[in-house]
Image (cartoon, helix red, strand yellow):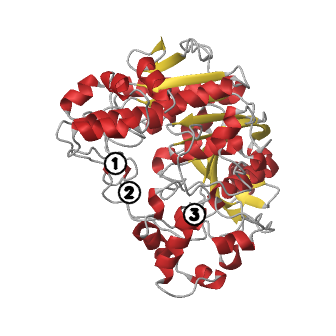
Amino acid sequence: MNAFLVKVVALYALATSAMTFATDERLNVESASGPVVGAWADESRNIRVFRGLPYAEPPLGSRRFASPEPVTSWQESRNAGTFAAACPQPDATNAFVWSRDPFETSEVCLYLNIWSRADSDTAKPVMVWFHGGAHTTGFAHARIFDGVEFAANDVVLVTVNYRLGALGFLAHPLLKEANEGHAGNWGLMDKIQALKWIQSNIDAFGGDPGNVTIFGQSAGSQSVCSLMASPMARGLFHKAIGQSAACVLPSIEKDADGLVRGQRLIDTALDGRPATLDAMRSLAAEQLVSAQQASGWDQKSRITIDGRVLPEHPSQVFAQGRQAAIPLLVGSLANEGEQLFPVNHKLTDDELVAQVSRISSTPDELLALYANERARSPGHALHALLTDRFFALDMRSWADAQTRVHDRVYLYFMNHVPPAFKLYAPSNPELLLDGGPRSAGAYHSGDLAYVFGNTRKIGLHWNEDDHALSAVMIRYWTQFARTGNPNGEGLPAWPAYDPQRQATMVFDTPLRTENGVRREKLDALQQPR
């Protein structure tokens, strides 16, 4: 090879080496916890992802049933190319749209994932996602939660795994004694620890720690509501979005601290053996998951009044205006109870009146508003009434309470009917319904793919109206994260909510605003017994 060719080859090698280094460099981050190397989520749009970053020490041994401990920093570069395991949970292979493909679980599960742009020097708003699943199932890396579209809309998205079921929420007298008078809500403390990690580390990933929005759906939304009421979480976030679950209606739970249920769960798991801390911490995760179902523990609220994270019920905090005074965006869907709450087909009309009398001082007047459902059957009337009370009323009540401490409150209601498919089973999403894929109405969790901008990435039977609505919803969500106001250039105007007018954005085709969605029914449901 002559000298000229040698020089050309050398220059080419140098150039390609520099290009490779430059590409790799955009995936290298020096965080406060230690150096990490991410992966490309969408290289064409300069969007990277950092998977499976630990934010707390593994909750094993003495750390089980205890507050999370900050993760120990590391020195060697950490490969963040693979999602971590989900937290232990029961099987959910035949659960309507919430069915799941098989997946790995482990108690070593306190990890988070970050999507961010690699081509911007400006600190971006941070959105922190808490998944749903009744605080007993779910994980942060489900494909439906892919964060590429959030990053494309100029926010940094973080999705968080947190302890579930008994491992995440068990309260027991022995745990209360060992934890300075409080027990339970370990999963809420995981979220708080994740938010602390974000405060210390997110700037290295392009995020602004002074502009953090927490958001979640179902149990994740209930967590958002609870964190707004928690003194331990104060100052760790600056805006909130709640989808389809709240915490502001007064509780009728007699075992508010969860100690009775927790004792019953442990007695079931230990099967007659003496209950000690060592014995509780020696149980296999599978034994605890089984016991939480066998003992009926999972049929009551997982979040309890533990004396530390929640010293009192959130409804009291919101009623007295002591919650976080921050912008809030909340809402629900038209048919949340579909397949989520059972319809009692054996319920008689007399039994219907008796049950409604327990929640209303004027049952006849209330039931008159559900005449159509009552004509179908007493069971359908009760199902519709309880669905409205648990979802639409609770979300409206959350909005009402927040207007007393902040003027940026926004309420939505989703009427648009999505196709029903297995949301968490991407390998086999088909869900065969007798009436076709859109016969389940606007079901619980039907908003997820729209909010994440992933209608083109998961599921089946989408159409152009779905894609168009999704494009609008993700823009509202990210614009709210930027400014505390979902309105932006090119978006239909979304009026702020107030308890008198009750302006509500109705996600439908076409999009519209409406004052007081289901107002007469919700007003009647709100009347105290």
Q: Position of residue 510 (x, y in %)?
A: 39, 14
Residue extending furthest toward the bottom? 273
Query: Alpha carbon of mark 2 to alpha carbon of mark 3: how far?
Result: 17 Å
Compared across the picture, whether 288 is left or right of 437 comes to right
Q: Which numbered disc, 1 or 2, marks the residue that appears first in the sequence?
A: 2
- Residue identified by numbered label 1: 422
Q: Amino acid at mark 3?
A: Ala
Residue named by callout 3: 84
Estimate the spatial distance between the alpha carbons at disc 3 and disc 1, rounded to whole Å.
22 Å
Q: Position of residue 527 (x, y in %)?
A: 50, 26
Kindly check if marks 1 and 2 are in contact, taking CB atoms under 8 A apart as contact: yes
SS label for mark 3: loop
Decide if residue 440 is in sight here. no
**302 versus 430 height, above or below:** below
Judge by depth and name the residue closer to the eye, 231 or 464: 231
- In the image, what residue type sits under mark 1? Lys
Residue occupied by mark 2: 100
Q: Secondary structure at mark 2?
A: loop
Disc 1 to disc 2, C-alpha distance: 7 Å
Q: Which residue: 61% across, 24% down?
A: 400
| Disc 2 residue type (three-letter) | Arg
Mark 3 Cα shell of 10 Å, populated few (<14), some (14-19), many (≥20): many
